[in-house]
Image: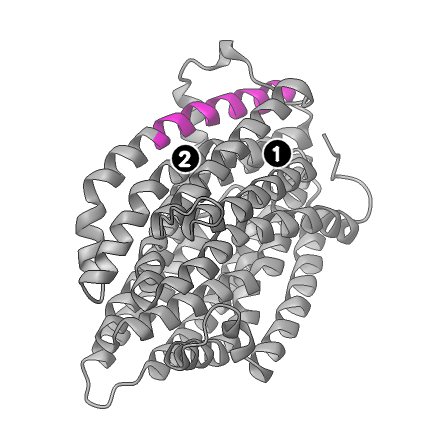
């Protein structure tokens, strides 16, 4: 365990954020590597995999419930030096991970066709998405165990093992993708099926490596079969903190689904441009997300230790670091947005849509960084409802006007992107206002 209740807070944040950022970058490379090779298969394949990959946000919502609840409770227990409670939460989180994995497989295979027929721009896009999801679902199911173990380590102030495992799995994915997608060396190209299969096999390796780490190395929290019997009070504690962040990610799924539904009227090239642009945007968000992910355990341990001044200092330091990082990438997107797209495709129509998306949406990068930081603080404080409320506001301000605008004569996609910027800005302001209230109540505890 790394004690985060003493020493320099900015140093703790940066020390944790660095391996988290590297790990998240390599995790994102799963999708970028697949996207690079899938892009060679045409617009329908790109659009199909992009729409199918949007289902990842539902899984991320569920893993957030598990991961945030596990991390926050273990961080607070570590701050109190309560090892027994930390181990109880860890083992119960693994039990919940198993239940979520089974639910993902059963529900996913039952609804794949309905989901893709709703979002696909044409029959070829729908077919590509269904083929991709069929082999991608096992990887999604395995994410729960991976997140539970990584979140437990993060709660104790440790991030490097998770980073190393993510690097190993991405390396395997990078090797398998050209072999399975294009048939390199084998002469048997599998197309989008190969992309999904490469990712699922790589995630399986990640789960195996993390399990091995807990068996051989980790001592503070460990696998204890006697704690595998359901403890519903522990489940309640995990869910109380984790459900609102899960709702936040579910709302991201709603946001992305609304966009895909609106954009489909502009054709597969437009969906492909948004698909690539949105994946690039997610990659750009990684530094700010890493800072937010580091903020939660640092602030969480100090909440557990009753050090309110250090909790406030954690927010100030994290907000400054995150804002600086997001300002830099905003300027880059304003300068050469098309540079990010050219790596994946040379289709002029796809690049035009993606570049316009990035040039406009980049104006909300700083707001998004502040939203991430505030969310990390809410997790540390053990009250994640305010973050959910601010996300609800954003969706309401975006989805309803967006659908209305799309029905008006002369509607253009840039109007949708500008609406998204305005909604994100208002969400950031509400998040900061709600966090101010939570920090005020912390001082009176």
Q: Position of residue 219 (x, y in %)?
A: 68, 20
Q: Say whether residue 126 is left or right of residue 386.
A: left
Magenta segment includes 90: yes
Queried whether the magenta region covers residue 343, the answer comes back as no
Residue drawn at (28%, 71%) of the image: 268
Q: What percent of the width, then of the height, locates residue 387? A: 45, 54
Residue 352, picture quadrant: bottom left
As rendered, which of 138 and 297 lies closer to the eye? 138
Q: Residues within 10 Å of mark 1 (few under 14, many from 20)?
A: many
Compared with residue 267, is residue 370 higher up or lower down, i.e. above or below? above
Quadrant in which residue 257 is drawn: bottom left
**Label disc, if present, on residue 412 of the rendered structure:** none
User: Taking 222 as reference, is 69 above or below it?
Assistant: below
Q: Position of residue 177 (x, y in %)?
A: 48, 49
Residue located beneath label 2 in the image: 239
Q: What secondary structure is the stretch in magenta mostly built from?
A: helix
Q: Nearer the viewer, residue 39 or 235?
A: 39
């Amino acid at each position: 365990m790394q004690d985060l209740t003493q020493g320099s807070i900015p140093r703790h944040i940066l020390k944790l954020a660095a391996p988290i950022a590297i790990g998240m970058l390599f995790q994102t490379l799963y999708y970028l590597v697949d996207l690079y090779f899938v892009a060679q298969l045409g617009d329908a394949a790109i659009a199909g995999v992009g729409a199918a990959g949007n289902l990842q946000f539902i899984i991320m919502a569920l893993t957030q419930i598990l991961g945030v609840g596990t991390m926050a409770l273990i961080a607070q227990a570590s701050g109190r030096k309560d090892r027994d409670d930390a181990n109880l939460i860890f083992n119960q989180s693994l039990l919940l991970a198993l239940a979520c994995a089974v639910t993902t497989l059963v529900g996913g295979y039952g609804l794949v066709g309905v989901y893709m027929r709703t979002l696909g721009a044409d029959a070829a896009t729908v077919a590509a998405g269904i083929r991709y999801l069929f082999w991608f679902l096992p990887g999604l199911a395995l994410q729960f165990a991976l997140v539970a173990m990584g979140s437990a380590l993060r709660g104790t102030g440790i991030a490097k093992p998770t980073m190393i495992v993510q690097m190993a799995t991405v390396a395997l994915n990078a090797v398998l993708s050209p072999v399975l997608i294009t048939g390199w060396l084998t002469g048997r190209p599998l197309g989008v099926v190969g992309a999904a299969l490469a990712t699922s096999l790589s995630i399986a390796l990640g789960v195996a490596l993390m399990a091995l780490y807990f068996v051989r190395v980790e001592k503070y929290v460990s696998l204890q079969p006697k704690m595998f019997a359901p403890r519903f009070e522990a489940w309640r504690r995990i869910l109380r903190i984790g459900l609102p962040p899960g709702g936040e990610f579910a709302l991201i799924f709603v946001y992305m689904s609304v966009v895909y539904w609106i954009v489909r009227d502009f054709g597969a090239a437009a969906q492909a441009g948004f698909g690539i642009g949105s994946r690039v945007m997610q990659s750009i968000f990684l530094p700010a997300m890493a800072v937010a992910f580091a903020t939660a355990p640092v602030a969480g341990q100090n909440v557990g230790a009753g050090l309110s001044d250090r909790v406030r200092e954690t927010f100030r330091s994290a907000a400054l670091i995150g804002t600086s990082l997001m300002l830099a990438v905003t300027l880059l997107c304003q300068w050469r947005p098309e540079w990010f797209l050219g790596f994946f495709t040379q289709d002029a129509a796809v690049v035009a849509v993606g570049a316009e998306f990035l040039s406009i949406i980049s104006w909300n990068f700083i707001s998004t960084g502040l939203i991430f930081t505030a969310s990390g603080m809410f997790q540390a404080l053990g009250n994640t409802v305010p973050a959910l409320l601010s996300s609800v506001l954003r969706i309401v301000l975006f989805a309803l006007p967006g659908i209305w605008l799309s029905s008006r004569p002369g509607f253009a996609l840039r109007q949708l992107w500008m609406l998204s910027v305005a909604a994100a800005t208002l969400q950031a302001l509400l998040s900061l206002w709600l966090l101010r209230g939570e920090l005020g109540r912390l001082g009176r505890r």
